[in-house]
Amino acid sequence: MSGVEQGVWVAPGRVNIIGEHTDYNDGYALPIALPHVVRCAATAESDARVMVSSRQHPGEVITEPIAGLADATVTGWARYPLGVVHEYVRRGYAIAGVRLELDGAVPVGAGLSSSAAVECAVAVALRDLFELPVTDAELIDIGRAAENSYVGAATGTLDQSASVLCTAGHALFLDFGRGEHDQVPFDLAAAGLTLLVADTNTPHQHAGGGYAQRRKECEQAAAALGVRSLREITDIAAVERIAADAPRRRARHIVSENARVLEVVRMLHDGRDPREIGPILTAGHASLRDDFEISTPQLDAAVAAALAAGAHGARMVGGGFGGSIIALVDTDRLDATVESIENRFHTEGFAQPRTFVAVPSAGARRES
Ligand code: GLA
């Protein structure tokens, strides 16, 4: 093998400004990458095996023959990196052997894409290390395929797209139907604003359960309306033609959410005060809570407490059934907003949330 034989690559988690569950409906979304990354130190080997370890799981070193990855029965954290190696091999890319050492700083189960960060860190490491002719679009698809087929979560490509394509200082406009993207300047600090993330400490997972059920109901809604995907529906009134209750509500969320993404992108492109996108974010939360039905008492309480403290907008983020919220706050109201959420959680008897500030950060890259 010629070229680099070892190195360190990183890929970030993400938080979505707006556009939830729209990815597998060929719609739109607007994520930013987080400063939190998964780091992957990769070394090329020639022993036809993949060895993975993780700083977060000391003592667990997993070794599998590359030819046997399809039948590997490993569960838990190691299944994500192994799934990416398997996906490369399945697509006919030559990987002679590799050692992968992971170190993840993206909160797990918080709706911030820790799994996509692992997949993308490994995917970009393998591409560079073995000099594979893989485009960013295929890289994203490799991460998605690992998650769908190997891990068994029927997710779309939002998380991997964000982890690979985001750039610092920008939100990433994604058009899933067309497979296109655009960098949208997103400088909150200049406007005296801060994006607060509150992880409600109620972990979720998407293999099976409610996520897969929502995806099925969206497909039923599209079938009922005679379209290939809900993206094609732009008139919200059309969804009322769907007889079945759950598919109708899911469609109402998707169609209105796509409109919200386009509206936010238009406002940011026009250079409007970012405070003005706040009410659209809050409307997105109501839609996820009432029509998509994936919020939780903790997420609702966090959103309500942020708004009560003066946030311009707040909403749950990610796949739902737990995880995090974002709140768009005046920077001088940051501490008061955190306090408001913490007090509300204390009163309600919920586990304390973890809060941090999100700045639009860079996508997957080689670090050393
Ligand atoms: C999870 C999935 C994504 C996307 C979001 C909801 O993060 O992995 O594909 O569907 O939920 O927007």
Image (spheres, rainbow, N blue to C red):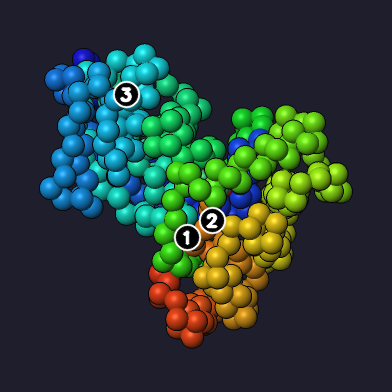
The residue shown at (74%, 36%) is: 222
Question: Dot 1 corresponds to which residue?
Answer: 323
The residue shown at (67%, 41%) is: 218
Q: State yes or no: Cβ of the residue under disc 2 lies below 8 Å from any atom of ligand 1.
A: yes
What is the CA distance from the residue labelled 3 to the residue labelled 2?
30 Å
The residue shown at (31%, 27%) is: 85
Question: Dots 3 and 2: beta carbons under 8 Å?
Answer: no
- Element at label 1: loop
Q: Nearer the viewer, residue 24 or 296?
A: 296
Visible residue check, residue 335: no
Q: Nearer the viewer, residue 368 or 144?
A: 144
Q: State yes or no: Cβ of the residue under disc 1 lies below 8 Å from any atom of ligand 1.
A: no
Farthest residue to the front: give it: 244
Question: Dot 3 corresponds to which residue?
Answer: 70
* Residue type (three-letter) at the residue carrying disc 1: Gly
- Element at label 2: loop
Q: Quadrant of residue 281?
A: bottom right
Residue 320 has which mark? 2
